[in-house]
Image: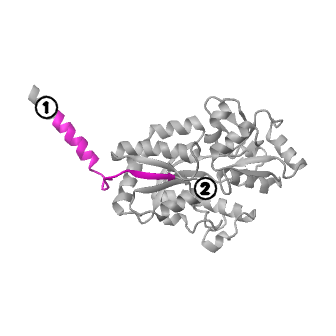
Amino acid sequence: MKKLFLVLIIAFGFLLTASAQDYAWQPDKPVTIIVPWSAGGSTDQMARLVASELEGILGQSVVVVNQEGASGSIGTKNALEAEHDGYTWTAGAAGDLGTYVVLDMLDTQLADWNLYLTVANASVVGVNADSPYETFDDLLEAMEANPGEVSVATAGLSSAGHNAMELISQATGAEYKHVTYDGGNPAVIATVSGETEVTTQLAVEQAEMIRGGRIRPLAVLSDTPLSIDGYGEIPPLTNWLPDIQLATNYFGIWAPADIPAEVAETMNQIWEDHISNSEVLQSYATERGALFTPAYGQEAQDLALSRVKAQAWTLFDSGKASISPDSVGIERP
C-alpha cells in the first residue's frame, strides 16, 4: 500500500512538472510590467491582478512598476526602448496606445505590439456629492450658463476621462475647465475633496467612492445602464444624447511585436487556457463595473482598432491632436 501511495505521489509530481514545462517560454528572472500611470488607477488595478495570475502560472515573479507622466507615453516609451526579450511589458488602454502617434507623443501604433486584453471599462460622469448637480441635465445647464468654468478632473490629455469629456463637449457644445492629474485615482480624489466639481474617469476608479456616497454618478458613457455592486444602476448617456458615437475602451498588457516567438506562444496559451477563465478578473469586473473581455492575437488587434479610430478622430476634431489620423493610416470610423 505504501509503495502504491509513493508511486501515486511521484506520478502526480511528474504530471505537475510536465504541465509546467508545456510552455515554450520558461522565464528565468523576474518579469516587469510598467504601468504608465499612478498607483490606484484603472490600469494599475488591472495590471496587479494580471501580474498575480501570471506569477502562479509562470512560476516567476512579475513586478509592477509605476512610471507615470505625459498621458502614459513615458512608461510606454520605456517599455518600447527596453530589450524586446519578453521580460518588459507595459499596460493601459489600447485606445491610448494607438493614439500617441496623432498626439505627437510617441511614434508607435497598435501593430508594433502584441496585445493581451483583459477588461473593457466605461467612463462615468461623476460629481462631488455636495454639488448642486442632481442630473446630467443640471450639469449641462451649468456648463452652458458658465462656459469654461465647471472644473472636470481627468488623468490628462487623451486619458479615458479626457476623451469622455471631449465626446460630450463635441456632442453638446459644452465648454469646461480641464484639470489634469497623473492618473485616474488622483483625479477621482480631487473630485471627492471638492478640488474639482466633476470627474469623467472610469467606473472602476470611481466605484468605491460611488458606493460610499462620496461621488454622485450622473451617467455612464454607454448605451445601456451600468450596474455597480452595492450601489445599483447608473443611467446611460444615450438617455440624453441618443446619437452620440461611443466605442468600447479595452484595457490589457502588451509587449513589442518582435518579442521572441516562444514568449508570444506562451502568452497566447496562457490567455487561452487561464486568463480567459480567470475568476479573479471576472470578480474584479463585476465588483467594479467593468466588462470581462479577454482577447489576444488578431482578435485583440481588431477590437482595439475600433477604439483607436474613434479616439484618434475625436482628438483631432477637437483640436487636441496635431497629426491627422488618416496620415498615419487610421481611418475615420
On the image, the x and y values in percent for residue 248 come to 61, 51
On the image, the x and y values in percent for residue 252 come to 51, 51
Specify the amino acid type for callout 2: Gly
- Between discs 2 and 1, the one toward the N terminus: 1
On the image, the x and y values in percent for residue 56 come to 36, 42
Q: Is residue 272 left or right of residue 306?
A: left
Q: Is residue 215 left or right of residue 289?
A: right
Cα gap from disc 2 to disc 1, whole angstroms: 56 Å
Q: Residue at x 34, y 47 (%)?
A: 58
Residue 115 seen in this snapshot: no
On the image, the x and y values in percent for residue 105 come to 62, 65
Specify the amino acid type for callout 1: Leu
Q: Residue at x 76, y 38 (%)?
A: 194
* Span shown in magenta: 9-34
Q: Quadrant of residue 318?
A: bottom right
Query: Foreground mark, 2 or 1?
Result: 2
| Marking on residue 69 | 2
| Marking on residue 254 | none
Considering only vertical position in the picture, is 127 above or below 155? above
Considering only vertical position in the picture, is 290 above or below 243? above
* Residue under numbered circle 1: 6
Residue located farthest toward the bottom when viewing the structure as drawn: 327
Q: Is residue 24 left or right of residue 51?
A: left
Q: Residues within 10 Å of mark 2 (few under 14, many from 20)?
A: some
Q: Quick one: 171 or 129, which is closer to the camera?
A: 129
Q: Residue at x 58, y 45 (%)?
A: 42
**Secondary structure state at the residue bearing disc 1:** helix
Residue 54 seen in this snapshot: yes
Whether label 2 touches label 1, CB < 8 Å: no
In the rendered structure, does residue 217 fall within the stretch colored magenta?
A: no
Q: Residues within 10 Å of mark 1 (few under 14, many from 20)?
A: few
